[in-house]
Amino acid sequence: MKILIVDDDELAREMLGNAVASGGHGVETACDGLEALGLLDEVPCDLVVTDWEMSDLDGPELCCALRKSPRYRGIGIILLTSRRGSVDLADAYEAGVDHVISKPFNPDVLLERIRSFGRAQEEGADERDAKPVCDAGDAVYERSATAEAESPAPDDEVDARASDAPRTGAPIDIEDVLKRCVGNVDLLRLILGRFEARTGEEIEELAKAIRLRHAEAALHVAHRFCGLAGNVSAEALAALASQLEDLASESAFDEMAGCLARLREEVDRCVAYVPRLMEKLDEREEVGS
């Protein structure tokens, strides 16, 4: 099948594309919903894997646009998200999503969802046929009620991971991120290098947004931080970034300042750990050669 990957994070697109290609599928990529719609007009695809939050036409908006078009009503849609609420998931399915997968994504789950869609496509299963919620001119379409969500972590678990408790153990789960790279060590090196290079710039931009009490800017940077942390399987860092994202949505600037300090500490811990990970990768390659 031909799969379209839609994500505004370049590294996320590379990781997703690498995982999808490992399943023997063709891959196209777009950085947001608008680019995806333009690309689909030129390159027919069987299924779309899209992030939720993007600057120009986000995931649910892209889903709605596809379901309203007779040309794309039957296309498969998988939505990736770090959102945790049941209301958000209900909104996603109402927008026309077939499956929701939590971020950071599990490549085995993603490939199984793609295979499931492929089997339904071959069998001409009814679950591929979108049905209108209402008969209005701009009806929103929903997919089959059998679509499943891989449930993200509950709020209390995230709060526990983002607490002030001393952090022990490795700040980056090398085995997990290597699994999501489907064993591609070169891609893993690229991801670690980009993480090391980008975190300093992002944290200063976040600090500036908090200092200027610019909630929307802080929200966007915190969301990007969630993606950065997720890319390298830095669970504690991702939890802190998620907490900052929630605080930014509430304009809770006083609490954000304290959370930012903990975020800086965790960033320092992660960045200091990257050279050790690079050494481990070198050792693995030497053993394997």
Image (spheres, rainbow, N blue to C red):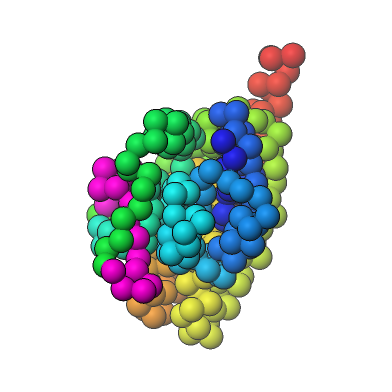
Numbered range of the magenta stretch: 135-154
Q: In this view, does 45 lie above or below 110?
A: below
- Left or right of 110 on screen, residue 90: left
Q: Position of residue 185 (x, y in %)?
A: 67, 31
Residue in view at x 68 percent, y 55 percent:
42
Question: Which corner quadrant of the image does residue 276 belong to?
Answer: top right
User: Relative to the observer, which residue lies in front, 143 or 22?
Assistant: 143
Residue in view at x 66 percent, y 65 percent:
201
- Per the picture, the main secondary structure of the magenta-coloured stretch is loop
In this orientation, does residue 112 appear? Answer: no
Q: Is residue 142 above or below residue 17?
A: below
Q: Where is residue 36 in the image (x, y as percent from the top left)?
A: 60, 59
User: Relative to the observer, which residue lies in front, 144 or 69?
Assistant: 69
Q: Is residue 178 above or below residue 198?
A: above
User: Relative to the observer, which residue lies in front, 69 or 252?
Assistant: 69
Residue in view at x 69 percent, y 46 percent:
193
Quadrant (top left/top right/bottom left/bottom right) for the C terminus: top right
Quadrant (top left/top right/bottom left/bottom right) for the N terminus: top right
User: Relative to the observer, which residue lies in front, 207 or 88?
Assistant: 88
In this orientation, does residue 249 appear? Answer: yes
Residue in view at x 61 percent, y 55 percent:
40
Is-magenta flag for residue 138?
yes
Q: Where is residue 28 in the image (x, y as percent from the top left)?
A: 65, 46
Q: In this view, does 142 lie above or below 247?
A: above
